[in-house]
Image: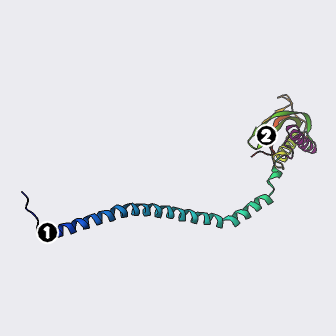
């Protein structure tokens, strides 16, 4: 059995219950507000960090623009063929090769166009060359072709002697060799990304 409470005990119990209800109400409101506050603090910290990174990137802009201007000043297009159309680019390579071969006392036998290949914003254009010349002129021709602008590349090089194995050349006479290779260059495709 329970005994009835005295008036002082009942007032104390009522006051304790009131305090308990008040603390519960405060906690019920404060805990979600603290969670929201923590969430927004983390979001603000992320945004401040992102803003600092953006400011560092923006601070690099003058240096990047200066570097871009230096690259533009180097004129990178000079390393590519002038014409992007396959036939015109092949004609450009033929003219370069013919001029160099004839300047080095080589005898051009034939030139055939190789089918072009597109790769992204670049077009590979090539020709197959056949000529004859002395070993010294062949060396000069190959050096001149690979060290000029626009850049040209020698592939599938084949050098064969025209003489029989038992042939003895006269003193001071250089034997001629038959040379065949692919000569390719690259052109920028207009409008390609």
Q: Residue at x 86, y 47 (%)?
A: 82
**Snapshot quadrant of residue 22:** bottom left
Q: Is residue 31 magenta?
A: no
Residue 94, given in percent of the width and then of the height, sits at 89, 39
Q: Earlier in the sequence, mark 2 or mark 1?
A: 1
Q: Residue at x 80, y 60 (%)?
A: 73
| Range of residues picked out in magenta | 81-103
Task: State the residue in front, 77 or 52.
Answer: 52
Circle 2 residue: 124
**Snapshot quadrant of residue 132:** top right
**Which residue reaches farthest left?**
1
Binning the other alpha carbons within 10 Å of mark 2 as few (below 14), some (14 to 19) or many (20 upward) gives many
Circle 1 sits in a helix, a strand or a loop, which is it? helix
**Which residue reaches farthest bottom?**
8
Residue 60, given in percent of the width and then of the height, sits at 66, 65
Task: State the residue in front, 1 or 159.
Answer: 1
Q: Is residue 42 above or below residue 146?
A: below
Rendering colour mode: rainbow
Circle 2 sits in a helix, a strand or a loop, which is it? strand
Task: State the residue in front, 174 or 122.
Answer: 122
Circle 1 residue: 9
Residue 45, given in percent of the width and then of the height, sits at 50, 64
> Quick one: quadrant of the N terminus?
bottom left
Magenta segment's dominant SS is helix
Residue 48, given in percent of the width and then of the height, sits at 54, 65
């Amino acid at each position: 059995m329970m005994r009835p409470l005295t008036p002082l005990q009942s007032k104390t119990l009522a006051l304790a219950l009131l305090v308990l209800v008040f603390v519960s109400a405060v906690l019920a409101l404060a805990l979600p507000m603290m969670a929201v506050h923590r969430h927004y603090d983390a979001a603000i910290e992320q945004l401040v960090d992102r803003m600092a990174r953006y400011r560092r990137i923006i601070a690099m802009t003058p240096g990047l623009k200066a570097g871009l201007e230096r690259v533009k000043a180097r004129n990178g297009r000079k390393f590519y063929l002038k014409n992007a159309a396959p036939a015109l680019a092949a004609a450009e390579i033929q003219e370069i090769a013919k001029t160099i071969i004839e300047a080095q006392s080589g005898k051009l036998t034939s030139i055939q166009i190789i089918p072009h290949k597109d790769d992204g914003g670049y077009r590979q254009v090539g020709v197959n060359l056949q000529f004859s010349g002395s070993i010294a002129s062949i060396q000069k021709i190959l050096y001149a072709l690979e060290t000029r602008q626009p850049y040209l590349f020698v592939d599938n090089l084949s050098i064969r002697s025209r003489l029989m194995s038992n042939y003895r050349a006269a003193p001071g006479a250089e034997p001629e060799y038959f040379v065949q290779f692919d000569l390719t260059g690259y052109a920028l495709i207009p409008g390609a990304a």
